[in-house]
C-alpha cells in the first residue's frame, strides 16, 4: 500500500510541475460552465421570460394596424423593434436575410381596409430559416392574433346573429352592436376565461433555481472536463513507456499490480480534486444546489472518476504514440460528451440516441447528476446509476490491467 | 520558389500523418454526424415524442352539459393530442401525474380544473396548472407552451361565443327557442369563421422539415477544426527550431522570411484542402446544399483558410515553444469557438453575448457559409463576411510579422 501511495505521490509531483495543468483542470471548465450556463435557459422552470427581437413594419393606411402593433408589443416573448423609414418593408426583409435580425412582421397597407370590409387581412411573417428563435415569436404573434380574431368574430357575429334572429340591423343598430361587442371583448380579456400557471414538481422550486442554466451546465461541464483531462492524461503513460521511465520503475522492487494501481490512483485523485473543486465553485459562484445527499454525490463522482481513470490507463496501454493517445482521447471524450447528454439534454434526442447514450458512462453520470440536482434523490435512489458507473470502472480497469505494458 | 518548396514539404508531411488526418477530417465529420443524429429531430426529423399526462378535473359540483363532462373532455383531448406525431398524451389522476412527472417518466402534466367548460361557455374563470419535470429543459417547456396555446384558443372561442350572446341579449332577453336557434347557428357560423379568421398570417419561412441541421453545424465544426489544424501548423515552426531542423535549414541559402512565408503557405494550402474536403464530405454525407453559386463557396472557403492560417501563425508568434503553442493555441481556439458560435447556435444567446461573438473569426466565417447554405446568398450576399474575414486575416498577419520580427 505504501508503495502505491509513493507511486501516486510521485506522479502527482510531476503533474504539479506542469503549469498549464491547472489552467486545463480548473480555469477552462469554469469558462465553459459560465458561457453555457449563461446562454441556455434555466434547468427546471423559467428564470424569467426570454424576449426575442421582432422587427415590425406598419404600412397600414388605417388605424387598425396600430392596434395590432400595440397588442404585439404587449406579448412577453417579443421585443418589438419598429421600422418607420420609407421602404422599411424591404429593409426589414433584407435585415432578416442578412442575418442581422431573426424575424420581421409586416402589416400591409390595406390591413384596415380589409378588416373593415369583412375580408381577411394577411400579415406577413418573414423569418431567417437558420434560426430557431422566430418559432417562439411566431407563436406569440399567433396568440395575439387569436385574441384579435376573437374580437373580430364577436363584432361580425353580433351583427349576423341579429340578422338571423330579427332581420338586417339598421346602420345605427349595427354600430351599437359593434360598440357593445368591443366593450365585452375588452372586459373579457381583462380576466381571460382560461389562464395557465406552472408548477415544477420535485425539489427544484422556482425560487431555488440558480440564475441561468447552471443547474445543467455546472454538472455537465464538470463531467466533461474530468473526462477530457482524464483521458488526455493517457498520453502521459505512453510518454513514460517511450522514454523508458516506466521500464526503470519495473526494475525497482515494485510489483506490476502496484504500478498499475499507482497509475490509476493518481488519475483518480486528480479527477476527484478537479470534480469537487468544480462542484464547490458551482455551488459558491453559480449558486448550484447539488442536492440533498452529499454522500450520494460522492458515490456518483467516485464511480464516474474510477471509470475515467480506468479508461485513461486503457488508452495509454493500447496506443503506441502520445499523439495517437491524444487523438483517440479527444475523439472518445468529445463523442462521449455529445452522446451522453452533456452538451444538450438527452430528452430532445431520438430514442435510439438515448439508448446509445446509456452504453457509455457519461449518459449514466448525467442522469445521476440530474436526479441529484433536480429531484434531490438519496443514496439509494441513485444506486442504479452509481452501479452502472461502477460496472464501467470495473470493465475499463480489468481491460487496462490486461493490456498494461512497460515496453 | 523556395517558399513553395517549403510549403509543399510541410503539406506532404502533414497529409501523410494519420493523426493529422484524423483531427482534420474524421473528428469534425464524426461530431457533426452525432449532432445531426441528436438534433435532427429538433429541426423536424424525429424528436423523441413529448410524453405528457392530462388530468381530468376532480368531481364536478355541477355539470354544464352532461355528467362526467370533465373526464370526457380530458379523454377526447388526450386522443386528439396523440394524433399529432410529436405528442403522446394519456389520462391520469393528479396523484399519478405528480409521481410520474416527479420521477421524470413524463415531461409534464396538464391539470384541467373543475369548471373548465363553465369558464369557456359561461362567465367563470379558471386556471389550468402545468406540472413540469424539474430536470426537463425542453419538453416540459413544450408541454407548458401547448397548455398556453390551448388556453388562448379556449379563451378566444369562449369570448367570441359569449360576446355574441351578450351583444344580442342586451337587446332583449331571448326566449328558449331563440336561444336554441342562436346556439345552433353560432356553432356552425363559428366553425366556418375559425377556418378563415379576420387576420391571417403568411409565413415566408422554410418549413421545419426542410431545415438541414447539418448545414448549420458542418461549417461551424469545419471552422473549429480548421483552426486546430492551423495552430498545429504554427506549432511546427517551433518544432523545427526545437528539433534542430531550422538551424540546418538556415545553413542553406534560405532566409528567415522565406522560411516563415513557406510555413504560412504550407499552413494555408493544408487549410484550403481541409475546408474544401469537409465541404465536399458535407455535401456527400449530409446532403448539404451550399447554394447555386459554387464560386461563392470556393471563395468563402479560400478566404476562411487564409484567415485561419494567419491566426495559426499569430498564435505561434506570441508563444515560445511547441508545447506552449499547443496549450495556449488549443485554449484560444476553444474559447473563441465557444464565444463565436462554433459549438452552439449563437442566435439563441442574449444580445450582449451576440455582440461579443461578432469580434470572433468563427462568427464571420460561419456566417458566410450559413448564408450560402440557408439563403443561397451568392457572392454578393456574403461580401460583408468575405471582407471582414479578409480584414481579420490581414490584421493577424501584420501582428504576426510584427511579433516575429522582434524575436
Image (cartoon, helix red, strand yellow):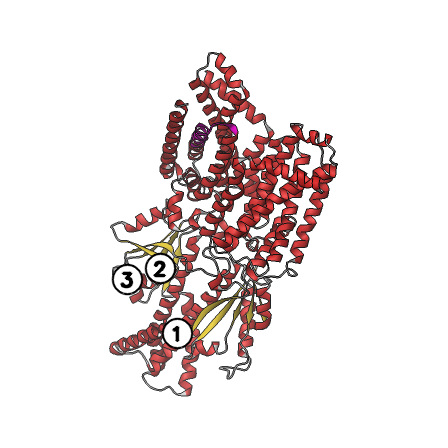
State which chain disc 2 sits on: A
Does B253 appear above or below A401? above
Q: Which residue is mark 3?
A: A66
Between the C-alphas of marks 2 and 3, the distance is 15 Å
CA distance separating discs 3 and 1? 22 Å
Magenta part of the protein: which range?
B305-322
Q: Residue at x 60, y 70 (%)?
A: B96
Pointers 2 and 3 within a single chain:
yes
Q: Are marks 1 and 2 in contact (CB under 8 Å)?
A: no
Q: Looking at the picture, tell me which residue is in the foreground, A277 or A198.
A: A277
Query: Taking B83 as reference, is B25 above or below it?
Result: above
- Magenta run includes residue A252: no
Q: Is residue A108 visible?
A: yes
Residue at (39, 23) in percent of width and height: B406
Q: Residue at x 43, y 53 (%)?
A: A133
Between B140 and A325, the residue placed more toward the observer is A325
Chain letter, disc 1 residue: B
The chain to which mark 3 is attached is A
Q: Position of residue A355 (x, y in %)?
A: 64, 52
Residue denoted by label 1: B159
Q: Quadrant of residue A124?
A: bottom left
Quadrant occupied by the N terminus of chain B: top left
Dot placed on the residue nearer the N-terminal end, 2 or 3: 3
The picture places residue B365, in percent across and down from the top left corner, at 43, 38
Mark linked to residue A122: 2
Vertical arrangement, residue B47 with respect to residue B404, above or below: below
Q: Nearer the viewer, mark 2 or mark 3?
A: 3
Real-space Cα separation, disc 1 to disc 2, in angstroms: 22 Å
Magenta stretch, overall SS? helix
Residue A14 percent across, percent down from the top left = 59, 35
- Tell me if B162 is positioned left or right of A376 in this view: left
Amino acid at each position: 500500500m505504501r508503495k502505491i501511495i509513493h507511486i501516486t505521490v510521485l506522479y502527482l509531483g510531476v503533474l504539479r510541475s506542469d503549469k498549464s495543468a491547472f489552467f486545463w483542470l480548473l480555469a477552462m471548465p469554469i469558462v465553459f460552465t459560465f458561457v453555457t450556463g449563461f446562454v441556455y435557459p434555466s434547468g427546471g422552470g423559467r428564470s424569467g421570460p426570454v424576449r426575442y427581437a421582432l422587427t415590425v413594419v406598419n404600412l397600414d393606411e388605417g388605424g387598425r394596424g396600430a392596434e395590432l402593433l400595440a397588442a404585439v408589443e404587449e406579448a412577453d416573448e417579443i421585443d418589438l423593434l419598429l421600422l418607420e423609414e420609407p421602404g422599411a418593408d424591404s429593409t426589414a426583409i433584407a435585415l432578416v436575410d442578412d442575418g442581422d435580425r431573426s424575424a420581421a412582421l409586416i402589416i400591409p397597407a390595406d390591413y384596415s381596409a380589409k378588416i373593415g370590409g369583412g375580408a381577411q387581412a394577411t400579415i406577413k411573417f418573414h423569418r431567417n430559416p437558420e434560426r430557431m428563435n422566430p418559432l417562439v415569436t411566431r407563436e406569440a404573434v399567433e396568440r395575439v392574433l387569436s385574441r384579435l380574431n376573437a374580437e373580430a368574430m364577436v363584432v361580425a357575429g353580433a351583427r349576423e346573429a341579429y340578422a338571423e334572429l330579427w332581420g338586417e340591423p339598421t346602420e345605427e343598430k349595427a354600430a351599437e352592436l359593434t360598440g357593445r361587442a368591443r366593450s365585452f371583448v375588452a372586459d373579457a380579456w381583462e380576466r381571460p376565461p382560461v389562464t395557465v400557471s406552472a408548477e415544477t414538481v420535485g425539489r427544484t422550486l422556482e425560487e431555488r433555481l440558480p440564475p441561468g442554466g447552471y443547474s445543467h451546465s455546472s454538472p455537465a461541464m464538470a463531467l466533461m472536463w474530468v473526462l477530457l483531462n482524464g483521458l488526455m492524461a493517457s498520453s502521459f503513460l505512453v510518454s513514460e513507456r517511450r522514454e523508458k521511465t516506466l521500464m526503470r520503475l519495473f526494475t525497482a522492487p515494485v510489483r506490476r499490480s502496484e504500478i498499475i494501481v499507482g497509475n490509476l490512483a493518481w488519475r483518480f485523485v486528480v479527477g476527484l480534486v478537479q470534480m469537487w473543486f468544480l462542484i464547490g465553485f458551482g455551488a459558491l459562484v453559480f449558486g448550484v444546489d447539488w442536492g440533498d445527499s452529499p454522500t450520494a454525490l460522492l458515490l456518483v463522482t467516485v464511480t464516474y472518476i474510477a471509470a475515467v481513470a480506468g479508461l485513461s490507463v486503457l488508452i495509454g496501454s493500447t496506443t503506441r504514440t502520445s499523439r495517437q493517445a491524444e487523438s483517440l482521447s479527444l475523439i472518445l471524450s468529445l463523442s462521449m460528451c455529445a452522446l451522453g447528454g452533456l452538451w444538450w439534454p438527452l430528452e430532445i434526442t431520438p430514442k435510439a440516441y438515448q439508448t446509445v447514450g446509456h452504453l457509455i458512462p457519461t449518459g449514466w453520470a448525467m442522469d445521476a447528476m440530474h436526479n441529484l440536482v433536480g429531484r434531490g434523490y438519496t443514496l439509494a435512489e441513485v444506486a442504479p446509476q452509481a452501479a452502472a458507473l461502477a460496472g464501467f470502472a470495473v470493465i475499463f480497469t480489468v481491460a487496462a490491467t490486461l493490456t498494461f505494458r512497460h515496453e | 520558389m523556395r517558399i513553395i518548396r517549403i510549403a509543399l514539404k510541410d503539406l506532404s508531411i502533414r497529409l501523410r500523418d494519420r493523426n493529422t488526418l484524423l483531427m482534420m477530417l474524421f473528428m469534425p465529420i464524426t461530431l457533426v454526424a452525432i449532432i445531426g443524429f441528436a438534433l435532427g429531430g429538433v429541426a423536424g426529423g424525429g424528436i423523441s415524442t413529448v410524453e405528457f399526462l392530462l388530468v381530468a378535473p376532480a368531481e364536478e359540483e355541477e355539470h354544464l352539459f352532461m355528467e362526467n363532462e370533465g373526464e370526457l373532455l380530458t379523454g377526447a383531448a388526450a386522443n386528439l393530442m396523440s394524433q399529432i406525431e410529436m405528442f403522446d398524451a394519456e389520462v391520469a389522476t393528479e396523484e399519478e401525474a405528480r409521481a410520474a412527472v416527479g420521477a421524470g417518466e413524463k415531461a409534464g402534466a396538464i391539470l384541467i380544473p373543475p369548471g373548465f367548460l363553465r369558464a369557456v361557455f359561461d362567465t367563470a374563470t379558471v386556471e389550468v396548472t402545468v406540472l413540469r419535470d424539474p430536470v426537463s429543459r425542453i419538453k416540459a417547456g413544450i408541454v407548458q407552451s401547448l397548455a398556453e396555446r390551448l388556453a388562448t384558443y379556449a379563451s378566444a372561442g369562449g369570448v367570441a361565443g359569449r360576446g355574441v350572446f351578450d351583444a344580442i341579449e342586451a337587446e332583449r332577453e331571448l326566449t328558449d327557442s331563440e336561444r336554441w336557434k342562436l346556439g345552433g347557428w353560432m356553432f356552425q357560423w363559428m366553425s366556418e369563421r375559425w377556418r378563415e379568421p379576420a387576420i391571417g398570417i403568411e409565413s415566408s419561412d422554410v418549413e421545419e422539415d426542410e431545415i438541414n441541421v447539418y448545414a448549420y453545424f458542418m461549417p461551424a465544426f469545419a471552422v473549429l477544426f480548421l483552426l486546430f489544424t492551423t495552430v498545429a501548423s504554427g506549432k511546427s515552426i517551433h518544432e523545427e527550431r526545437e528539433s534542430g531542423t531550422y538551424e540546418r535549414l538556415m545553413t542553406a541559402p534560405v532566409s528567415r522570411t522565406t522560411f516563415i512565408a513557406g510555413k504560412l503557405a504550407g499552413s494555408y494550402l493544408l487549410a484550403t484542402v481541409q475546408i474544401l474536403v469537409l465541404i465536399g464530405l458535407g455535401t456527400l454525407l449530409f446532403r448539404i446544399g451550399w447554394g447555386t453559386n459554387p464560386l461563392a463557396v470556393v471563395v468563402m472557403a479560400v478566404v476562411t483558410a487564409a484567415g485561419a492560417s494567419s491566426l495559426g501563425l499569430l498564435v505561434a508568434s506570441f508563444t515560445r515553444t511547441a508545447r506552449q503553442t499547443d496549450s495556449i493555441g488549443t485554449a484560444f481556439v476553444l474559447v473563441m469557438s465557444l464565444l463565436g458560435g462554433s459549438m452552439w447556435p449563437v442566435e439563441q444567446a442574449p444580445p450582449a453575448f451576440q455582440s461579443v461573438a461578432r469580434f470572433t473569426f468563427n462568427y464571420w466565417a460561419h456566417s458566410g457559409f450559413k448564408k450560402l447554405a440557408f439563403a443561397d446568398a451568392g457572392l454578393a450576399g456574403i461580401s460583408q463576411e468575405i471582407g471582414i474575414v479578409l480584414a481579420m486575416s490581414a490584421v493577424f498577419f501584420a501582428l504576426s510579422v510584427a511579433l516575429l520580427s522582434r524575436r
